Amino acid sequence: METKSSHMLLAGDIGGTKTLLGLFDPGPPRPRPIAVRTFATLDYDGLPTMIADFLAKEDRNHVSSDAITSACFGAAGPVIGGSAALTNVPWRVDGHLVADRFGFRRVLVINDLQAMAYGVPQLTPSELHPLQPGQAADGGNIALIAAGTGLGEALIHNIDGRLIPSPSEGGHADFAARTEREIALLRDLTERYGRADVEHVVSGHGLVNIHRMTHRSGSSGCAAGIDLEGADAPAAISTAALEHRCDCCVETLDLFIEAYGSEAGNLALRSVATGGVFVGGGIAPKILPAISNGAFIRAFRGKPPLEALLSSMPVHVILNAQVGLLGAAAYAASS
């Protein structure tokens, strides 16, 4: 437990699988966590119930919720009029309802990748793993892509020296197949879903989708014996691949990484991300050996005639698992 503050922020990073809630001292140089807890999102019927649980415990720890001056929540879905319907969870996050329930003077709801984007400038070098050194251009835009339960994307525009994050629903854009194997995957996804979006490939569920295709065309079943209906199936697939326990799982992870790198390159081109590209989300740090072996960056760069431009962009994996929560706190502190 950190030292108590008389002026605190409540921040939240609301995802399809888990939600982080935290109390923060506003800083500077960056918001400092006082108390942070992780919740299984679907264990609760909505955000107010979860907040009540969190604050009740902190009150028992003698951290008074009366000191909270503002709150900000990053939500995994499009935000319209101060509320968001989560894409992969049957929740609506409504800032007005939270303010009325708890008496907070100001409650902000922003897209979860927009919140993560506010956290990017707060990161230190030790919280980043380089995939490509590049050379960040002064005044350049920044791109952020993050695969976890779903796929999030955000742009960070550099406007007269100010970094302005902008949300995106680019994860639901169409999947662009590049190779014969990816075309086979595209056909499989189109048959299954009616269309193939990027999130059907580059996400935890995407690993499951790719696994189905690679094992259907394989000579036998999954050598690792993975139950695709289990909640831990994506992690089990990547672990089996990293440990070389199943050739088809290895191919699954290879296809995933190349598609991830290619989509990161697409986003870098759309934003002209000469200030750098950041890879967030829960998956990349867990498969760091595989994502660092060159396949991701080859797919990222492989977009003639602009390979030189893409090769000049720094690319980093974000190691701080709480960057979205940090960004929500940073936005609350600055608004």
Image (spheres, rainbow, N blue to C red):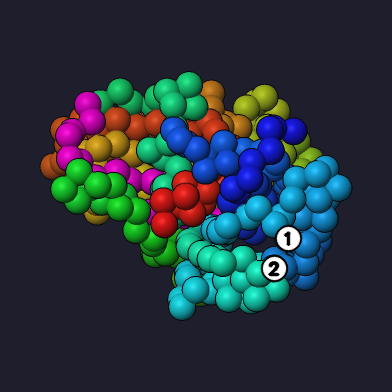
**What residue do we see at 78% from left, 62% from top?**
52
Spot occupied by residue 330 in the image (x, y as percentages of width and height):
47, 46
> Mark 2 Cα within 10 Å, few/some/many (few <14, many 20+)?
some
Q: Which residue is mark 1?
A: 51
**What residue do we see at 34% from left, 58% from top?**
166
**What residue do we see at 42% from left, 64% from top?**
169
SS at mark 1?
A: helix
Between residue 124 and residue 87, name the one nearer to us: 124
> Mark 1 Cα within 10 Å, few/some/many (few <14, many 20+)?
some
- Figure check: 211 above or below 249: below
The residue range painted magenta reads 135-155
Between residue 10 and residue 164, name the one nearer to us: 10
Give the left or right position of residue 103, taking residue 288 as reference: right
Give the left or right position of residue 56, taking residue 187 as reference: right
The C terminus lies in quadrant:
bottom left
Looking at the rendered image, the disc whose residue lies closer to the viewer, 2 or 1, is 2
Callout 2 touching callout 1 (CB < 8 Å): yes
In the rendered structure, which amino acid carries the disc numbered 2? Phe
SS at mark 2?
A: helix
Q: Which residue is mark 2?
A: 102
Spot occupied by residue 165 in the image (x, y as percentages of width and height):
35, 53
Give the left or right position of residue 60, taking residue 163 as reference: right
Give the left or right position of residue 128, taking residue 304 as reference: right
Between residue 195 and residue 158, name the one nearer to us: 158
Spot occupied by residue 232 in the image (x, y as percentages of width and height):
75, 46
Q: Is residue 248 visible?
A: no
Between residue 147 and residue 11, name the one nearer to us: 11
The quarter holding residue 192 reads bottom right
Task: Report how far apart the C-alphas of labels 2 and 1 lie in the structure.
Answer: 9 Å
In the rendered structure, which amino acid carries the disc numbered 1? Ile
